[in-house]
Image: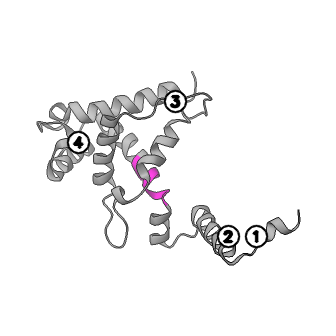
Amino acid sequence: MRPVLTVVPGPCRPLSKRERRVLAALLDRVCPGGHGLPTASETRALETISTVLTGITPDGRFFFRFLLWVFEWFSFLLAGVWGRFSSMPAAKRDRVLESLSESRWFVLRTFLKVVAVFCQMGYYADPKVQAALGYDGPAIAEAKRADAERGRAARGEEALWRLGS
């Protein structure tokens, strides 16, 4: 059996508009922001998730796309709420997610957890979120380095690492 999270070379079909719409609706409910944190729609979480999906096996990508399809079209079966998930008001989306998290069926709780992990990974990988949390990790350090280099370039100075060559 192949592992799901191995890097697979070659092209990957990007998420469709509908899949992106469903994922954006999920992101807004799973990572709503507040208390100084940006909302998911103010971050690059959607792009981060799309990038991560290019690095997993075709079976893993198929499963993730299948989960998005299930969320979009089967809210009635999952939580007794009519309508497409991406076009529901926030209160109904919350009801669907709450129903899934409290389901007695393990597979439904697992579906929600898989999607929530991807949403949180994309959200917390964003430099805006990391800066708001006070995390000075690699993404923030890289952004500061790029800003410093742009500042030096504007002043006509060379970056220190270029001087040795």
- Residue at (33%, 61%) from the top-left corner? 39
| Residue with the mark numbered 4 | 86
Magenta span: chief secondary structure: helix
Res 159 label: 1
Q: Are marks 3 and 2 in contact (CB under 8 Å)?
A: no
What separation in Å lies between label 4 and label 2 (alpha carbons)?
A: 41 Å
CB atoms at circles 1 and 2 under 8 Å apart? yes
Placement of 66 over or under 154, stated as above or below: above
Please state the total of marks drawn on the protein image: 4
Question: Which numbered dot is residue 149?
Answer: 2
Q: Is residue 107 above or below residue 47?
A: above
Question: SS at mark 4?
Answer: helix
Do the residues under discs 4 and 3 have CB atoms within 8 angstroms?
no
Estimate how packed mark 3 is, as few (under 14), some (14 to 19) or many (20 or more) residues with alpha carbons within 10 Å: some
- The magenta-colored residue range is 119-126
- Amino acid type of disc 4? Ser
First in residue order: circle 4 vs circle 3? 3
What residue is drawn where x is 50% and y is 56%?
Answer: 125
- What number is the disc on residue 62? none
